Image: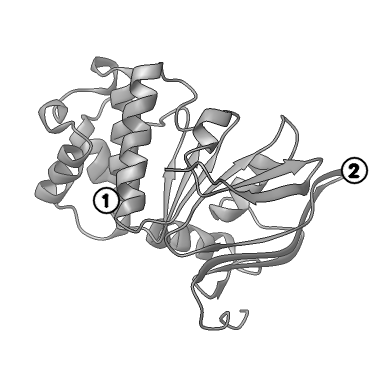
Amino acid sequence: MLNPVSADDQILVISDVSKIYGPIKALQNVSFSVKSGEWLAIMGPSGSGKTTLMNIIGCLDSPTSGQVLLDGLGLDSLSGSELTAIRRESIGLIFQQFHLVSYLTALENVMVAQYYHSLVDEKEALEALENVGLGDRAKHLPRQLSGGEQQRVCIARALINHPKLLLADEPTGNLDETNEGLVMDILHSLHRQGSTIIVVTHALEVAAHAERTLVLEHGRVASDVKNPAAQ
């Protein structure tokens, strides 16, 4: 295992990370860091390496080479089971396609995340739903919820175990303008409370909410700039 990163405020450090699938170089020597409490947007055209990078940060995959540090812990050399444990303990994942269990209520979908982490606490899960404005929808199945409501269940599920890093993949990609606004309001609230957020998105209007935007092209970092207009 790698030695911890020096004591500073960097919660995520990516150093010379590459990912190669046969002849395809999905990522090539990507390097950047994210401060604790920062909001970063990752953008790029299809095939730029966004999904690959998200999977590596989210402990769903490992790099071919390079170093990944999450809160001082080296991830790049960990086994699949060790990565699963880190993902369960330290990362909250929000998916574009929601990935809710169809036969479980909104409350039960949040409680599933508790089950795999530690102990199930129905009161805490209900509070998580209330925090995203869905306390009155707790007993509804996913098919009884709108797309925006399902995404907010995903956010409650991602936050229930108090992750060090919140990683969102196109969190507004399937939402109308009204629900997009609701989801972005929740992310802003979380950011004000000190959450570290990484959003992978195609949408300029979504990226504009972040403090920084990192753009990938052909598996490389094309730009990494602060967003002066970010709220």
Foreground pick, 7 / 17: 7
Graded by Cα atoms within 10 Å as few (under 14), some (14 to 19) or many (20 or more), the crowding at tag 2 reads few
Instruction: Identify the residue shown where x is 34% and y is 22%.
Output: 179
Residue type at mark 1 is Ile
Instruction: Identify the residue shown where x is 50% and y is 24%.
Output: 173
Q: Secondary structure at mark 2?
A: loop
Q: Residue 73's spot in the image, x, y percent? A: 54, 74
Instruction: Choose the circle earlier in sequence order: 1 or 2.
Output: 2
Graded by Cα atoms within 10 Å as few (under 14), some (14 to 19) or many (20 or more), the crowding at tag 1 reads many
Residue type at mark 2 is Pro
Q: For marks 1 and 2, give the CA distance.
A: 40 Å
Instruction: Identify the residue shown where x is 30% and y is 45%.
Output: 189
Foreground pick, 103 / 97: 97
**What residue did someone put label 1 on?**
160
**What residue did someone put label 2 on?**
23
Q: Residue 219's spot in the image, x, y percent? A: 78, 45
Q: Quadrant of the N terminus?
A: bottom right
